[in-house]
Structure formats: structure tokens, C-alpha cells
Image (cartoon, coloured by chain):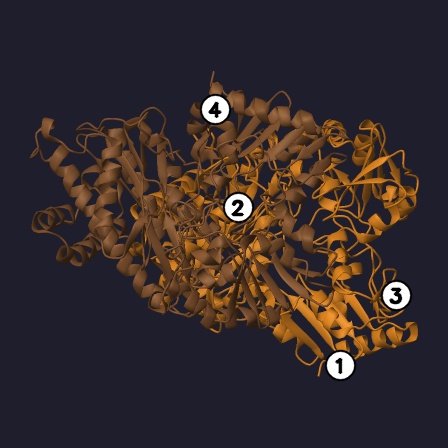
Chain colours: A orange, B brown
Amino acid sequence: MNETIVTRLEALRAKMRAEGIDAVYIPTSDYHNSEYVGDYFQLRAYFSGFTGSAGTLVVLKDEAGLWTDGRYFLQAEEQLAGTGVDLYKAGEKGVPAPEAFLAGKLAGGNVLALDGRTVGEAEYAKIEGALEGVLIRTDFDPAENVWADRPAPAARPVSAFPVEYSGRSAAEKLADLREEMERKGATAHVITSLDDIAWLFNLRGSDVEYNPVFLSFAVVERTAAVLFTDGTRLEADAAGSLAEAGVTIAPYDEFYRYLGKFTLEDSVLVSETQASHRVFAVLEGKTNVIRCHFTPVTVAKQLRNDTERVNVCVAHRRDGVAVVKLLYRLDKEYRSGSVREGDRRLRTELDVSRALAGYRAEQPNAKGPSFETIAGYGPHGAIIHYEPTPETDAPLDANGFLLLDSGGQYLEGTTDITRTIALGPLTDEQKTDFTLVLKGTIDLAMAKFPEGTCGYTLDILARKALWDAGLDYNHGTGHGVGHFLCVHEGPAGIRRVPGDRVDQIPLKPGMVISDEPGIYRAGSHGVRIENLVMVVRAEEEGFLQFETLTCVPIDRSAIRKELLSPAEIDWLDGYHAWVRRVLTPLLDMPEAVWLEQATQPL
Amino acid sequence: MNETIVTRLEALRAKMRAEGIDAVYIPTSDYHNSEYVGDYFQLRAYFSGFTGSAGTLVVLKDEAGLWTDGRYFLQAEEQLAGTGVDLYKAGEKGVPAPEAFLAGKLAGGNVLALDGRTVGEAEYAKIEGALEGVLIRTDFDPAENVWADRPAPAARPVSAFPVEYSGRSAAEKLADLREEMERKGATAHVITSLDDIAWLFNLRGSDVEYNPVFLSFAVVERTAAVLFTDGTRLEADAAGSLAEAGVTIAPYDEFYRYLGKFTLEDSVLVSETQASHRVFAVLEGKTNVIRCHFTPVTVAKQLRNDTERVNVCVAHRRDGVAVVKLLYRLDKEYRSGSVREGDRRLRTELDVSRALAGYRAEQPNAKGPSFETIAGYGPHGAIIHYEPTPETDAPLDANGFLLLDSGGQYLEGTTDITRTIALGPLTDEQKTDFTLVLKGTIDLAMAKFPEGTCGYTLDILARKALWDAGLDYNHGTGHGVGHFLCVHEGPAGIRRVPGDRVDQIPLKPGMVISDEPGIYRAGSHGVRIENLVMVVRAEEEGFLQFETLTCVPIDRSAIRKELLSPAEIDWLDGYHAWVRRVLTPLLDMPEAVWLEQATQPL
């Protein structure tokens, strides 16, 4: 039994009893619909023990359920053991969605409680629609008076993101936004998404681990713009550039009250997928609400300008140097035999993770990892979002695969790369798996497609080689990536089924997306090969293609060349020649020698 | 000026003036949301002159517009010339939908008139939603008192489709349907789609050209079932099998009145994409209406049973014999030089069309063409749905491409095949085009995919070779095909964008779909290569694949072999060996000798 979680749930249930509540709905969210949330908002993890990045917890009087997706099934099973919380594998056949589950458990007159600030408007509508006759309290913070040592909300320093990196000033971006508001007939626009605010005002913070954002709201009007955040933490350059762009500062807590000023004279544009239920509850009926799917800032932010397009290549070169240093080290310690077993420094998964963070930190303008490194050796590679902890940290050995998924933040952009590395001899199955996954990575990278094409149309290119062998992977093929912002940035993406976030979002020049097929054999090994690609114009009028940004060799020793087509071999040889050309001048001699050999044609 | 059309529109406008109507909306539809409609319902063609299979006409006081899709842009441009009707290319950038166009033209208090029996409920909702303040009359038949020589509604004989061909009796199908109604909580189900009614009751008619359906409605209740159609035209076997299944007959015109019997005690299941606005207008408020996207009959009808799966192969063999006889003849007259130019019998497109119809008619159980044959020589091949008429009929010559898209109805199933045939020397561009299209046909045919995959996921397989060359085609890749029913049968299909009809419809064993990429070079030539494929289980657990049904050689003389991958060459050689094995015993000696040579490995 997991006593910690059982005790926490008991405390929550005591509060539920005291307030006459039958069920509590706890999403993984802050007040900004963020994918990754600060410590203050980690309620779902606190009450369930499950630490994955995505999940929804539902607590009833005598049972509790946690919903998460395919990336986390194995991890959630382990972490929920003994907590009394049941795992619901979201998206699997026959598994009800949380709201359908609640509909089956609650009767008319029952009370469901949630915190309306942490539930999106679309999500709330789904819950409300499913629960006829159930009373829904939206002012309930499950942690209040229960989570004794809850951390304070983050309020770390916020600095300017200078125009030589952002390419456009906040004033220019505001002017574009106001034009778009004009087109939509809006006199005001409420922005609640943290990365959109950071991008719009050219600011960066560190309130959420790995994501250079800061807790804030923004309201942009025809002439005014207000940023709701703790003003004292703005560094001088940040305060200066805001003043220049005509932005005033107000306390974070003033936000909901400020919204009260809008009347039926105003037309307020709000994103129904990004703003919380609370925002709509405050505005609806008092003013004209214009609903949009995403804020125009989200749409504009994806399309890198010329400065960003040049810089993101710089960031990937620096990242390539860091990763190659690690690959060189692994080769020396495990494959080439030049370091004796007893003298190895990279003994475990965590050693690898730390060494890589160190190599990245040495790079100019490095700003830390862009997410928790996944370093999964052997069977751990099959756990899609495995992150080694001191408890799970596995020793490496000179055989099989190490799956290494990591990324860095740089002033020039955000990186995200997965390499699956042979530490020694491989089985035939391992080589075949590696090659089929590699075919997927390459085939998607080679795609050419007409303007207007959405990600779901291209998804099969990454899966086809696996499908031909009767294999598949249970995660998306690609996610959008921010620019010195969040490593997962919607809505652009490449997924099998058009979901809410990617539906009808055509790929456009300047979008950066990951290309990361994989295969996972539970208990044995996992393979994933991930490059970031940027959408660029093709030579043919009206067509687009991808430019691969990630600049790190792919392990040739794991490839069964006879499974690759001539076009795939050409692509890989060309890629390796480019990697060699770009990185060699940036490496020390022994690493450059290693790279020379690692990038030979197949 | 096209006086015929101008005069007809003037008569309609006089009626509009007399009745105070500002706009008339004329879809291409009968009272059954059919894609192809009988002569009685050809209002859109009557008032516009445009004879394509799809289009919507909007008539205002001083202008008129016709909307049609990419297949028909060239044809519509030609046929609308001089009519005063403007062409709106549906789906093209910046072209408003008809309802948006109307919204821009009509003001509050204006009157829009339409025939609620010919407008689907979903379509009506869209129109109503777009036209705030506009009054909509739904009882307006534009042809009444205007179209003097309007043909009577068809009422041709209806015969039984025996169980040795259908595989399941009407009684069994009704039992399945009643189970599904039970699951949906329905006490009655209204069916308005003609092919669903024909399939459910194992009947076939010929009220709509090429489609063996008959004008009818059906209402299925827990114990009763009523078929609304002219009972006197039922042949003895049909009447007998209906009586056996407990089905009673009522006059066609009784249908709407019969719906009046339902009260709030009943729950009536109706498809909101298939039933007309009138059906909903009659039922809503009087009874409980349960809306479904498609009737359960539509869903069941797609999944061929074992008898149908065997038979559809038989149908395609017979069709293969007919098409090969024509290919042999074309080869003799144009390519081999064994017939002197002056002695040719297939001199024009229409000659080809008639000869092919003749060869098909010779086959056992042949029931005529499944659609109007497209025989497009040279530049006509670039008009996607070109059908030769005496006015357009082009003479053939011993060079370039003849594009031939045709199909047959057989008691064993429906066929649909396109072959592009070299009548003599080809240009390099023609050969390259042919080969790129062929790659698409093959690559889709070779697909293997997990259960749950929808058509839109596979679409790119047919386009990829073209996209890689910066080319594309402006039509869907595949449509569902009925079983001795409509050659276009929804909702299964393979399209680039998930539309209403294919969205979330996974491919399932027994579905038959076309695989028909193409390329069209206006003024020069067109290439399309179409096979029908059936979804079958793959060897790998949980995976599906296609079995190609169409059994006719593909013109090897038009192929640039160096553009095909080894896997594509293997597929084509294997396909040709199968065609030879299957058809040779069914052919006369000279044709068999020709086939032997036409099916040699590349």
C-alpha cells in the first residue's frame, strides 16, 4: 500500500464530506491551460502519485480513477500501485472518458467540484454536457487546507528577449495583433496562455521547469495593453521594452477583477480552447464575447520570421556539438574498448543524463534542458516517457540499446532530439526495429506536399515501414516546437487522427515540428529516432517540404542497409555528410575524428 | 447566348416575381438525397444547362450561380457559356459556399424558396444558420408550372435480388436492423435512401439510370415494416419475398402522411445526413426523433458477407473479359497495324463506348453499365468526368492516350475501372505522367494498416509519387462501391481531407473502394488508373490490407520502368500474372494470345 497517497486522498475525502461533495475533478493544469505546470499546480501528482506530464484524476467517495495516454501506461501502472487509484487507459477501446465515467457514477442532485480556473472552457462544456442534473461547483481548490506544504506560486525573474533574437519588437507584434483583432471585430483580446504572452511581449521567465515562461495574463485593447504579473520581478531591460511598447503592468491577482470592466460596448476575443472556464464565467453576459479556437498569437507564433529561422539552425548546431560529445564518450567507454570497464564514468542512465546536461551547458547562450531527459537503457527504452530517477537508475552495459531523448534551450531556439544508441552487439530484431523506425524518420523528412496539407495527411509516412511489418507505435508522430519556448507547442503537429489541436491546421513555412517514430517492445527494448524539421518552400510552385534541423549522426552500426531504399540511403548519406561538414569545425580533434568515421556513407 | 436556358430562367423568374420570391435554391437531388437522380428530378440541369452529376444552382432576380467541384470545372465552364449563370468553383480559395453567397445577397425580410423534400436536413440547417432574418419557404417546387414537358417520376419494374446473390434474406437483415434499433432505443426507423432500401429488402429496380434502385421510402418498426412504392410494379418474386419478410406495401405518396402517426410514445430513428428537411419538419415536435449520422443500413451494407465477397470476384472476372476484348480490338486497330486505317471500326470515343457496352452485355448476368462511360481521347482525357456526346465525339488516332473510365452492373456486383491506353507513340511527359500515376495506384493497393485506420490516413499513398514531382489531382482518391447497387456508395472512401462522409469511418473487411489517382494536363492529355480493392484481413493480428478486384492489364508500353521501385515492379508483375491466369480460360484464342503478351513481366 502507498500510505502517502492513501493519506492524502483521505484528507481530500474528509473535506469533500464536510462540504457535501460527491466527486472532485482534478486535471493537470494551471490557470493557463499549460501542458507542464509549476509545483504550485501539481495537484494531480500530489493526490495520485503519478508524475507523468499528462493525466486527469477523478476522486469519488470510495474510488478514484486516473486517465492518461499511451506514453504513460507503464509508468502509471507502476506509480498507482497501492494507491487505490485505478488506471484508465485513455483512448483504448472500451475505456470511458472521465466525463462519461462521472456520468455513470453521479446521479441528479450529486455535487461535482472543480477549480474553474484550471479547467478549459471546452473541457468544462464537455463535463457539463455529460452530467445532466449534477450540480457543479467551480470554486473548489482541492489542495486548499489539505496540502499543508504546498509550494508558493513561482515568481522568478523575467528578462527581455531582445529583438536581435526575436526578430520583431513587441510593438510590431502588438500592431499585427491589433490588425487581426480589427478583422475579427474585437475591441479587446484576453490572452491566458503563458507561451503566447512570453512571445508577444518578447519576455522570458522560468516559472515552469524547462519552459521559459512566467505566470501572467494579458489583455490587449485598441490602444492599451496590460500585462498581469508581479512587476517587481521584471528585470530592467524587460521593464524598459514593455514601456516602449506601451504596455502597463498590473498584479497577477488583479486579472479577473480587471475583466469586470468590460461592458456590452466592448467585444472581447477569447480562445475557447485556451482560456479557462472562469474567464468565460466572468465575461459571458457582461460583454460581447467573440470566441476563437486559438488566439491569433498562437497562430502567428508558429511561423518563424527570418531572424528566428536563421537562429534555430544555430541552436541546432550547438546542440549537435553537445550530443556528439556525449556519443563520442559513450563510444569510447562501451564500443571501442579504449576505456576499461572499471574506468567508465557513464555508468548509469543518470550519469548519461547529467553528462549531456553538462555538455549542453558549455554551449554559448545555453539556457538549460528543454525537458527532463529520457535516458532508457534496455527494457527502460520501451517505456515511452521514462525518466530515470535514483530509484530506477539502471547500469549500462556494452550491449543493446540506450534510448536518449533530450533537448536544450538556447537564446537561438529550442531543440529536441532522440537517438537510439547501440552500446555493443545487437540482436537481429533490434537491428530490424532500428531500421524500420529509421525508414519512418527519413520518409517523413523527405516529404513534399502541396500548401494546405495538414499534419494528419503525412502521418503514415513515418508509420508505413512499421505497418508493413505489422508493427505500430502508440504516440503521435510529431509535435510543434517553440522558439526558446515550450518544447511542445501547438497546434501544428503530425498525428494519425486529426484531433482538436491539429484539425485543419495546414503546415506553413517556418513551423518547426518533430519527426519521431518509434517502436517499443515491453521488457526488451525501445527504438525512437527523432529529428526536428522546419517547413520550407519547395522548388515547385505551391509545394512545401521539410528542412531537417537536428544535426547529430544516426548510429550506422544498428542499420540493416538491405532494408533501406536507394532514396533512403541517399538521404542518410547526404544527412551525414552535412552533419560532418557543419560540426567538424566546432569539435575537438578526437571527437572530430570519431565524427568523421560515424558519418561515412553506408 | 444559350436561349433555351435563358428562356427557362426567365420563366422561373416570372414565377418568383408572382410569388414574391427573391432567391431559389436548387440542389441536385431527388427526395432521397441520391447522388444520381432520375429525369423527373433533373431541375438543376434543366435550369442551368450543366449536366454534370453534382452541382447546386442558386437563382436570384438578376443573377444566378452554379457550384460544382473540381471534376467538372472545365465541363461547367463550357456548358454555362451564354446562359447567364456564373460558375463558382466549390472548394477553391476565396469561393464562398452557396449559403454564404446567399447571405451576401439577401437581406432581412427577403424570401428564399426551396423544395424541402430535395434538401437534406444538415444542408438545410447550414442554409438557415447563414441567413438570419431571411424567410425560407420550403414548399416550392421550381419546376411546377414552368417545366412543361417534365417527365413523370420513374416507376419501372422491381424484381427480387435472390438470396443466392444477396447472401442474406430480407428477414435476416430486418432482424439485424431491429437489434440495432433496440440498442439505439428506437421503436421505429425511417429510411429514405434508395440504395439502403434496395439492399435491406433484397430488391432491385431501374428508376435511376445506371443505379438499380427504385423510388421508395421505408419505415421499419418493431414488428411491422412498410415499403412505400408503387405496388403494381413489383414482380411476383419481389412481392413474394416481401410478404415472407413481413413487409407491407403502401403507395409512395403515402409516406409523409404515414409519418404523422408517430406520437411522443414513439422514438423514431432518422439519419440527419440522408433524410430530407421535410421528414424532420413532419416528425419534430410530434414524436421523439433520434438522430443518427447514417442509417444503420448504410453501415451494414458496406460490409460484404461471404456470398457477396465471392461474387464480387466473379463480377470482376466477367468485367475483365469485356474490357480485355476492347483492349485487344484497340491494339489491333491502332497499335499492331493489323487493321488498315480505313477499315477501323473504333473510329471515335463514342464507338469505343458503344463497343465496350456491347462486350459487357455479352457477359452472363450483365445488367448494363454502372455509369456513363468516360472515353476521353487526347485533350478530352484532361476533363475529369468527360462523357462523349455526338457534339464532342472526337476521332481517335494512332498516338497519345485514350482515357477510359467505365463500369458494369452484374448480379454478382458492380465494377468500376479506368485504364489509360496508348493508341500509339507517347511523349516522354506522357510516359512519366503515366508511371507516376501508376505508382500511386500500386502504392495504395500495397498498403497494410491497423484496424481503425480511416481512408484519409491512406490518401497520401496514392498521391506521393505525384507530390514528389510537384503534381497533384483535384479529386478524391477512392470512393466506396455498392454491390449491384450504386457505383458511388458512401461513407467509406479515401480522400485527402476527412469530410462529412468519411470522417471517422474506419476501413473494415468487406468494404470495396476505388483506388484511382490521376493527372490532368488541360489541353493535352489525362491519365487515370483505377482498380477496385476490397478490404481484407492481413496476416498480422489487428492489421488489414487490400485485395485488388479489378482484373485487366495495365498498359506496359506507357511505363517508364526506371521510375518504379522493385516492390512496385513485383506488384505489377504479380498482378499481370494473376490477370493472365484468371482471364485466359475465358477468352477466345486471338485475345488470349494478345493477353499473354500484354501481361509479360516488365
> Mark 1 packing: few (<14 Cα in 10 Å), some, or many (20+)?
few
* Residue named by callout 4: B80
Q: What element carries label 2?
A: helix
Pointer 2 and pointer 3: residues touching (CB < 8 Å)? no
Q: Is mark 1 on a helix, strand or loop?
A: helix
Above or below — where is B249 with respect to A263? below
* Residue named by callout 2: A455
Q: Is residue B21 visible?
A: no
* Of labels 4 and 3, the one closer to you: 4
- The amino acid type of the residue labelled 1 equals Glu
In the rendered structure, the residue with mark 3 lies on which chain?
A: A
**What is the spatial separation of the Cα atoms under label 4 and label 2, in whole angstroms?**
38 Å
> Mark 4 packing: few (<14 Cα in 10 Å), some, or many (20+)?
many
- The amino acid type of the residue labelled 4 equals Leu
**What is the spatial separation of the Cα atoms under label 4 and label 3, in whole angstroms?**
71 Å
Above or below — where is B40 with respect to B493? above
* Residue named by callout 1: A3
B368, B392: nearer the viewer: B368
* Of labels 1 and 3, the one closer to you: 3
Per the rendering, the mark at residue A144 is 3
- Indicate the quadrant containing the N terminus of chain A: top left, top right, bottom left or bottom right: bottom right
Sequence-earlier tag: 1 or 2: 1
Percent across and percent down for residue A448 are 43, 39
Q: Is residue B339 left or right of residue B447?
A: left
Q: Is residue A246 left or right of residue A502?
A: right
**What is the spatial separation of the Cα atoms under label 4 and label 1, in whole angstroms?**
78 Å
- The amino acid type of the residue labelled 3 equals Glu
